Amino acid sequence: MKRRTFVGAATALTGASFLPGFANAQSKEIRMIESGGASGESIQKGYIDPLKAKTGINVVRESPSSLGKLRALVESGQTGTTLFELGSGVVLQAKKLGLIEKLDWAAINPAPMFPEAKNEYGFGYQYFSTIMAWRKGAKEPKNFTEFFDTKAFPGKRCLPDYPHYCLPFAVQAAGVPIDKLFPLDVDLAFKKLNEIKKDVAVWWKAGAQPPQLMKDNEVQYSICWSGRVVGDPAFGLNFAGGKADLSFICVVKGSKPEDKAAANKLFYEMSLPENQAKAAEVISYTGPSPTLDALLPKDKLWQFPTSKQNKDVQYFENAEWWADNGEAVNKKWEAFKLSL
Amino acid sequence: MTRSTGFSFIAPLLVLMVVAFNAPIVYMLGLAFWEKGRGFTLEHYEGLVEAPVYLRVLGNTMRIALIATLANIVIGYPLAHWMRGLGSRGRMIAIALVVLPFWVSILVRTYAWIVVLGNGGIVNRALQWSGLTDSPVSFLYNELGVTIGMANVLLPFLVLPLFAAMLRIDDRLLQAAASLGAPPRTIFWKVYFPLTLPALAAGSLLVFILCLGFYVTPAILGGGRVPMISNLLDTLINQIPRWEQASAISTILLIVTLAIFAAYRRLDRKASA
Amino acid sequence: MSDIRLEGVTKRYGTFAAADSVDLSVTQGEFVTILGPSGSGKTTLLSLIAGLNRPTSGRIFIGGRDVTNATAQERNIGLVFQSYALFPHMTVLQNVLFPLGVRKIGGAEADRLARDALKLVRLDGFENRRPSQLSGGQQQRVALARAVVFKPDILLLDEPLGALDRKLREELQVELKQLQRTLGVTTLLVTHDQEEALSLSDRIMVLDKGRTQQIAAPTEAYLRPANRFVAEFLGIANFVSLPDGRQGVVRPERVRLAGAGQGQGQGQGQAARVVEAIYLGQMVRYHLALDDNRSVVAAVPFLGAAHAPGERISVSWESADVWPVT
């Protein structure tokens, strides 16, 4: 292609998107960056496929998502990606850094949702739990005091290599009830971690590690994501004291109005319990509808983060506290890691 | 063709290099000095000095990288030397085997080590079966695991240049040394080894620098017990996020790396002067 | 200084014999050249003597000692390669000091010996250069100095001048001969260059397909070749039929020319036509066609006038200059 024709084509393309009359239209295709794996497939089957069937709008998925990637996207001024998946803690940071847009909840007009999922800056679309699990045959702990008691419950542990996944469980081990976890007693948490560290064989970075390590009998107990262990007869698990957290879908700062309009249609689909039930067939994490339990198979209710029996015994992630204290805690965490 | 017209041919490429590769790096490094709305600051470096835990992670990374590089040399040098002695067919096979890991995803390779070296892995089962040990030996989830993993992944970076340098050594030099009365040990240390030294130094430097940036292997084979600077940078960029702090650490990392490189160049020039 | 003796030395690679029952005796201080085309086994023979290789059978003696199974290190031999084989990471002086170092000769004495050796090859002043900073001829002289500095029992030269251009080669031939005479060291040279062999050696050994063809003084081998191969390999040979049915060889210098019809000498003049006249400075080489279509080469001193191509002349030679070959 000659240079001149190339420039001409580029002008034609950019020109089209600014034509008056198109401003309120919806794009026929938008892009989303999500965390990938089964979670991404659940988005496809639960939400994107119904959206496409109803409206013809397609959503192209990419993965994985990270705050660094989002920041790079926004700071480079791109508008190609509209939707971005972020964890609850990261939503706050992304908001502070001006990387995401406020959602127009009136325009989305969602079906009823749990209040924490209806964030000003993000659609909490997927609950996931971080819980204790063990290799079948190991003595079964009922709470984190027992989980941290390596004398009464002997065996190697596998804990997350992230302070915000580890510390709240450590203070529970010291007897703090789940409604009194925050503000977090950081020193108490590290005291408990120092007691258990010699029995921790692996600090995991990837969610796939703990189930594999338990299967290989490298460790007997793990703190891990519920979706990785439920339904596998090789493992026992307990939601008691677990952490319920939400993944959010956010709108990238500077997205075009027509893309945002298309995104709102997707958000609406994501609020429907019947769609959430479809997504839950792919992954055992659940959407934010309070009436979802009725649509899920009765015999599997014990597997899901939001089923009544599980939601009540877990604490919910305190993203605000971590946003204010995360960095200071991380320095202590690195020092702790160096002491291993 | 004059020099200047020659330059004009590569100028566009040079511009592309600077814009596409160097400018983003400079921007990233600049983040530590320059904050939006606040201007020039050294605060992020002060933070590093006041709470040196991040510097200690950097130190730890250097130490691990050094150990892994040494392990690489201990394995790689004899391997390359052995390959030199093979026939052309044997060499082809050996090179393919050395390069093979390049074609396999780093994640797959790393998990493969778990199968081999885990508590229930092949090696431990063999050791216990043969009665050499009663309980499994901890190869993984410690510094040993990280070292083994990094040595494995980076071995081709050392072996290939070393092997190429060894192949270039004329057999007649070694024959000449023998005919001049030198015993094999003297031939090796006075003739063969000095001739491979530049390639060994360059390969080791490459391995060392790559070790500094290792991410996946330490996280998995180290069981998270071996803090490395790139894992820390990941936390600072993706979890917390403090890009300014990450930038300050990266700058220090870059300076250290360049200093090592400069020292190598000086040594090299001295040796060939 | 020692003598060399080979007894039935054979080296086989599978069924191929690179050296086949070779016998050779080199006396102390003698300069012998092993001459042969490439693939004749001459380098194999040298590497067997140097100890870089072991013979399949036969025995090798140096200075009366059986060294057949001795390593190269144990033989005390100075070896010079065509490729020089200087150690590129060492200076000229360090290269020459190397064999002294392995003999535990150090300090001032080693330094003096090395500098003397370099003076001998006229390279004093080049001590601190690297081999890569020297010309080919200079590098070869360093290799020579390195090979003689430790006073080896014998000196082995493997095509030492092969990589040099003609003028330099001729200069170095003279130097090599002088050096060998000065040191009086028993020397064995391998080359495929028959001129070099003829000009340098006390005796030459012609080798073909791993077998000895002739061992003789240069002029002897040239004028009285043992067989057709030697005759053809050493210079140009004119083959003629002898009355008894055998073949004889006449060297071009022994061919006489005269104007057409003017028979000269005792041989019968034969009519011939000049095909080509090649000027070689002091000599002219004529390629001639006899009337029966056989060709003859003649080399005669150039005295200002020459026969032109196409000219008819008469060719003759003394019967004493014809050497019968098989």
Image (spheres, rainbow, N blue to C red):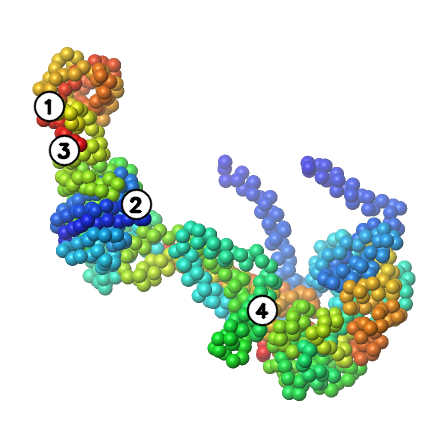
Q: Residue at x 23, y 62 (%)?
A: C103
The reply, left or right, for residue B140 in relation to residue C113 is right
Mark number displayed over residue B114: 4
Q: How far is disc 2 from disc 3 in space, using C-alphas?
A: 30 Å
Q: What residue type is labelled 2?
A: Phe
Q: How far is disc 4 from disc 3 in space, using C-alphas?
A: 80 Å
Q: Hey, which quadrant is residue B192 in on the image?
A: bottom left
Q: How crowded is mark 1: few (under 14 residues within 10 Å), some or many (20 or more)?
A: some
Residue at mark 3: chain: C
The numbered mark, 2 or 1, whose residue comes first in the sequence reads: 2
Q: How far is disc 2 from disc 1 in space, using C-alphas?
A: 43 Å
The numbered mark, 3 or 1, whose residue comes first in the sequence reads: 3
Q: Which is closer to the viewer, label 2 or label 4?
A: 2
Q: In this view, does A188 lie above or below B103?
A: below
- The residue carrying mark 1 is C318
- On the image, the x and y values in percent for residue C53 come to 27, 53
- The residue carrying mark 2 is C16
Task: Report the front residue among A31 and C138.
Answer: A31
- The residue carrying mark 3 is C224
Task: Please say if the residues under marks 4 and 3 sit with CB atoms less than 8 Å apart.
Answer: no
Q: Which is closer to the viewer, label 2 or label 1?
A: 2
Q: Which amino acid does label 3 sit on?
A: Arg
Task: Please say if the residues under marks 2 and 4 sit with CB atoms less than 8 Å apart.
Answer: no
Q: Which residue is drawn at 21% across and 22% down?
A: C296
